[in-house]
């Protein structure tokens, strides 16, 4: 089955500090979103990328993508052998993903969902996710063990106030999950039609349908650029890749 990737890039990136929408901020001079599209288009399996732009910014995103097309001769709307489309996003990440998914034609049997905020994911991670979906898993997430111990707390109402600890889940059984998350298309469509409460990742919607979700090994370089320090790390990774 052909593979499409949906890249939600409509978030404002408040935690990164003031400035442009997060996906449009530069890493070593190139917008984060462009790095993310390159990372997915690098897989020879991915033939369509749907970028979900800030609601007021599809035209700007479209011209950015055209300006960074891989080959100078590629027609507008494509990077080499990967076509792209831009659609406007929604209020939440979940809405943005649903809007992107609606733009994926039915012949794409496998759909990846990848955060624009994970611009440096290696192509081997992308391909491992695709392979696991093609092998029959309805939903696949890249995952890594945790370095930190995690506590469940009773959240304080005022920021900075002490919070009572409720429980300490066994660290060895926990995983931090990344993107791209990969799905059988029909499963992801059904998940978006069925699950109405807020979620922070797409795979959890498939869990709520009672269907199996499996992990493949994630990668340190697939980290999410969220806070100012992450920008420093991302630029260091890019500099090291150029060596
Ligand atoms: O906020 P968070 O870091 O979880 O955002 C993850 C991804 O979802 C980012 O790429 C962001 O641009 C995207 N997003 C979106 N639409 C929203 C909120 C977030 O496309 N309304």
Image (cartoon, grey):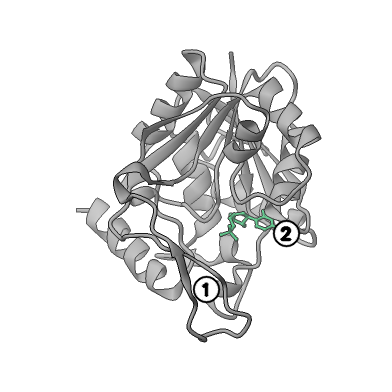
Dots 1 and 2: beta carbons under 8 Å? no
Q: Nearer the viewer, residue 211 or 21?
A: 211
Identified at 54% across, 67% down, the residue is: 25
Label 2 sits on a secondary structure element that is loop
Q: CA distance from mark 1 to mark 2?
A: 16 Å
Q: To which quarter of the image does residue 73 belong?
A: top right
Query: Residue 78: percent from the left, percent from the top?
Result: 62, 34
Label 1 sits on a secondary structure element that is helix
Identified at 32% across, 52% down, the residue is: 146
Query: Residue 182: percent from the left, percent from the top?
Result: 54, 30
**Quadrant where the image shows the N terminus:** top right
Q: Is residue 242 visible?
A: no
Q: Residues within 10 Å of mark 1 (few under 14, many from 20)?
A: some
Q: Is residue 103 above or below residue 12?
A: above
Question: Ligand 1 is located in which of the four quadrants?
Answer: bottom right
**Could you tell whether 231 is left or right of 157 in the image?**
left
Q: Nearer the viewer, residue 61 or 213?
A: 213
Label 2 sits on residue: 54
**Could you tell whether 165 is left or right of 198 in the image?**
left
Please tell me the numbered disc located at residue 60: none
Q: Nearer the viewer, residue 239 or 152?
A: 152
**Residue at the left extreme of this rendering:** 243
Identified at 64% across, 18% down, the residue is: 109
**Could you tell whether 69 is left or right of 124 in the image?**
right
Q: Is residue 57 above or below residue 75?
A: below
Query: Residue 68: percent from the left, percent from the top?
Result: 54, 49
Label 1 sits on residue: 16
Q: Which of pointers 1 and 2 indicates the residue nearer the eye?
A: 1
Mark 2 C-beta to ligand 1 under 8 Å: yes
């Amino acid at each position: 089955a052909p593979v499409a990737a949906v890249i939600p890039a409509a978030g404002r990136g408040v935690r990164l500090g003031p400035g442009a929408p997060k996906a449009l901020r530069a890493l070593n001079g190139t917008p984060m979103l462009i790095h993310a599209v390159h990372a997915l288009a690098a897989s020879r399996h991915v033939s369509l990328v749907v970028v979900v732009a800030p609601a007021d910014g599809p035209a700007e995103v479209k011209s950015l993508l055209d300006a960074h097309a891989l080959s100078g001769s590629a027609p507008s709307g494509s990077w080499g052998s990967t076509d792209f489309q831009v659609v406007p996003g929604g209020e939440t990440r979940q809405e943005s993903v649903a809007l992107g998914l609606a733009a994926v034609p039915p012949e794409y049997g496998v759909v990846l969902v990848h955060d624009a905020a994970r611009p440096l994911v290696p192509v081997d991670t992308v391909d491992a996710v695709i392979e696991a979906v093609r092998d029959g898993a309805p939903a696949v997430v890249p995952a890594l063990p945790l370095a930190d111990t995690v506590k469940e707390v009773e959240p304080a109402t005022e920021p900075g106030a002490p919070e009572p600890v409720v429980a300490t889940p066994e660290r060895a059984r926990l995983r931090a999950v990344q993107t791209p998350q990969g799905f059988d298309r029909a499963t992801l469509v059904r998940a978006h039609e069925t699950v109405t409460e807020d979620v922070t990742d797409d795979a959890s919607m498939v869990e709520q349908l009672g269907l199996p979700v499996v992990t493949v090994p994630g990668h340190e370089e697939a980290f999410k650029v969220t806070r100012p320090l992450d920008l420093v790390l991302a630029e260091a990774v890019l500099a090291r890749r150029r060596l």
